[in-house]
């Protein structure tokens, strides 16, 4: 089973992601460093973070209110979210309007691959008890969960999804082939990786990696990936 998976790769044009949040500060640092930062600088992706409060009305710029039926916790109001989504969708066509939600479809590498081929994506982050159901019923086209646990807000989840997609865009990683050998491409985990020194206090890098025979090394890496997947995540091999 070759480790270099075939996945569809974006051919041209940059990706635009609009993230809507009532706590935009939570998104600043995760999307402002490293690979995502460089991808933005190269024009491979543009990421716009929208503060929901800018679309709230009244003196207090409220974006949440008490829940009907009296259950505990505040609910994000329809109007500010409606206004920003309508503003964006009037300007361009979006492939998906995503709501981050623990009851959404579980995010995984195939979903990230698919989203990396899109042109424009909106990601709405919930907070408090979540968003008024009517937004989900009428405006949202896709709901994504990053795992079976509950975060305080959708921002960390949106950052995880954005980061995963951006590193798949051609040119985002310095070595194009690098993303292909990552875990979950081709339903396999990544083989182990090593760097210098070759010997640290007697902890040695496997000899084969130093032998210089690229074909032999590549076969060894493939077998390591399969062994590791069998051991740690056998269900991936059943797919
Ligand atoms: N009452 C909701 C949870 C609200 S948590 C419920 O029980 O389903 C507040 C917000 O955090 C959610 O609106 C969502 O945007 C985000 N969030 C929490 N956990 C998440 C997860 N696992 N994946 C994606 N988003 C999540």
Image: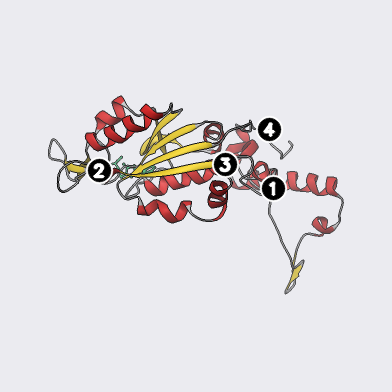
Mark 4–mark 3 distance (CA, rounded to whole Å): 21 Å
Q: Which is nearer the N-term, disc 1 or disc 2?
A: 2
Mark 4–mark 2 distance (CA, rounded to whole Å): 40 Å
Q: Where does the N terminus fall, quadrant-wise? A: top right
Number of residues whose C-alpha sits closer than 10 Å to that of mark 4, classed few (under 14), some (14–19) or many (20 or more): few
Q: Nearer the viewer, residue 139 or 88?
A: 88
Q: According to the image, label 3 marks what residue? A: 44
Q: Position of residue 166 (x, y in %)?
A: 54, 43
User: Residue 85 is drawn in which quadrant?
Assistant: top left
Circles 3, 1 touching at the beta carbon (< 8 Å) = no
User: Residue 134 is drawn in which quadrant?
Assistant: top left
Disc 2 under 8 Å from ligand 1? The reply is: yes
- Judged from this view, the residue extending furthest toward the bottom is 201
Q: According to the image, label 1 marks what residue? A: 175
Disc 4 under 8 Å from ligand 1? The reply is: no
Mark 2–mark 3 distance (CA, rounded to whole Å): 35 Å
State the residue at coordinates (39%, 29%): 91
Instruction: Note whether 209 is above or below 5 in the view shown.
Output: below
Q: Which is nearer the N-term, disc 2 or disc 3?
A: 3
Q: Which is nearer the N-term, disc 3 or disc 1?
A: 3
State the residue at coordinates (14%, 47%): 59
Q: According to the image, label 4 marks what residue? A: 6
Q: Where does the C terminus fall, quadrant-wise? A: top right
Q: According to the image, label 2 marks what residue? A: 129
Mark 1–mark 2 distance (CA, rounded to whole Å): 42 Å
Q: Position of residue 150 (x, y in %)?
A: 34, 46
Q: Which is nearer the N-term, disc 4 or disc 2?
A: 4
Mark 3–mark 1 distance (CA, rounded to whole Å): 15 Å
């Amino acid at each position: 089973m070759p480790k270099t998976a075939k996945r569809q790769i974006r051919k041209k044009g940059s990706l635009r992601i609009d993230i809507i949040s009532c706590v935009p500060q939570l998104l600043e640092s995760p999307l402002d460093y490293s690979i995502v930062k460089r991808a933005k600088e190269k024009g491979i992706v543009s990421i716009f973070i929208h503060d929901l409060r800018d679309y709230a009305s009244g003196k207090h710029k409220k974006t949440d209110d008490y829940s009907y039926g009296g259950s505990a916790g505040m609910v994000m109001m329809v109007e500010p979210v409606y206004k920003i989504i309508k503003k964006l969708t009037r300007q361009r066509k979006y492939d998906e309007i995503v709501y981050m939600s623990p009851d959404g479809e579980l995010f995984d590498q195939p979903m990230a691959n698919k989203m990396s081929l899109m042109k424009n994506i909106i990601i709405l982050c919930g907070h408090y008890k979540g968003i008024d159901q009517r937004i989900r019923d009428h405006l949202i086209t896709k709901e994504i969960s990053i795992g079976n646990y509950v975060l305080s807000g959708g921002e960390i989840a949106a950052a995880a999804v954005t980061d995963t997609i951006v590193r798949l865009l051609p040119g985002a990683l310095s070595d194009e082939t690098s993303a292909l050998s990552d875990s979950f491409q081709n339903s396999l985990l990544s083989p182990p990786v090593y760097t210098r020194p070759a010997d640290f206090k007697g902890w040695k890098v496997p000899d084969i990696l130093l032998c210089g025979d690229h074909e032999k090394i590549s076969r060894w890496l493939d077998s390591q990936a399969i062994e590791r997947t069998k051991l740690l995540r056998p269900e991936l091999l059943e797919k």
